[in-house]
Image (tube, rainbow, N blue to C red):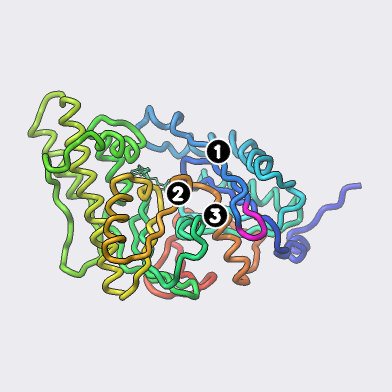
Amino acid sequence: MCSYLNPSEFQSEARWRPGSVLGIESSCDETAAAVLSCEGEVLSNVVSSQVAVHEKFGGVVPELAARAHLGKIDMVVREALATARVSKHTLGAIAVTQGPGLAGALLVGVNYAKALSYGLGISIIGVNHLQGHIASAWLADSMFPLSCIVLVVSGGHTHLYRHEVDGRCTLLGRTRDDAAGEAFDKGAQMLGLGYPGGPAIDRVARSGDIQVFRFPRFHRAKHSLEFSFSGLKTALLYKLREMGGPLRSQQTADLAAGYQEAIVQVLATKAFAALKQSNLAALAVVGGVSANTRLRTVLNERAAREGIRLSLPPIEFCTDNAAMIASAGRQLLMNGERPHADLDITPAERFVMVHEETRSNIGFSKG
Ligand code: ADP
Ligand code: MG
């Protein structure tokens, strides 16, 4: 005989019981699942990229992203459990990206996670994607100190936070227009390097000379921690118009190197300015752009020179992945956050400026 739980019964039953955590991420164009052990060790981290689906359009097509997630999610979760050698029946909780992101894409992950948690009678916790990126700083370096400065640089975000010991995050500065990853993607498109643009510019710039083309670096006021990349993009457009005709491969490489250098130097300068202004000596740089080779070199050199403790997650934790979502979810549950069986997607949820406490000591707002 079948017995059905109604949602209120389910909620009271689905208490967080310490155990391994399954993370699910589907906010944009990666379908990802990961399993963390009871102690927080990453047992598996499976990412299925949709690059092949979107590359002919030069960017992510939301409807296609949602369909691709639907086709892949079950397989990705099964693979994550198999690789981790964890039975779904021994899971303690499921953490899933709730927002921000593409609504259709988020719906796939959230509904899958809800159905699985309902079926297994275990807790489900919604995670903010940015909070996931921030958690990645501690995935490979669990002793990374707090308080610290965190720079989140991805396709949708360029945000500088001060992260306190108790988990509170204060936004110190953000981009006024394009995110750094967006600047990489749009720059690559103009240079004819395709999608996704960040890795393409990274690769081509290695054979370029950063001295040949100097692109503008936005610094607004002396102590400002705000970013802007739209002027840089326009400068590349004008430069390409001025040069005319098809580019030689060395010219493309030099342009890519100069363009990348402008982004990297601005990111590094502001991150180190934030450290100085906050009188802190620990910096974490997370999100897809933190995979950039030149950015990692510049940050490592400067951190060594100035005695700054630097956390740069391994590449597999920089771009979107579910290990960071599982880690952030596990942290929320350990901090006493109540699981919510009726969670919904929050496509436009974002971090807010200072210390607004609504969830787990980290400021969130909808809108
Ligand atoms: P999202 O923006 O959806 O959170 P990610 O955190 O995976 O996604 O970040 C994706 C962004 O990171 C894209 O804009 C991509 O071009 C950029 N990116 C990825 N790898 C590199 C790299 N090596 N150099 C520069 N940018 C990169
Ligand atoms: Mg991301």
Could you tell me residue 130's position as x and y percent? 45, 58
Rendered residue at 13%/34% (across/down): 240
Q: Report the front residue among 222 and 141.
A: 141
Type of amino acid at the residue the image marks with label 2: Pro
Residue underneath mark 1: 69
State which region is magenta.
Answer: 36-40
CA gap, disc 1 to disc 3?
17 Å
Mark 1 residue type: His
The extreme right residue here reads: 1
Above or below residue 67? Residue 367 is: below
Q: Which mark is residue 293?
A: none
Give the spatial CA distance, label 3 vs label 2.
15 Å
Q: Quadrant of residue 98?
A: bottom right
Identify the mark nearer the N-term, 2 or 1: 1
Of mark 1 and mark 3, the one earlier in the sequence is 1
User: Which residue in the structure is indicated by mark 2?
Assistant: 314
Magenta-colored stretch includes residue 137: no
Mark 3 sits on what residue? 325
Secondary structure of residue under mark 1: helix
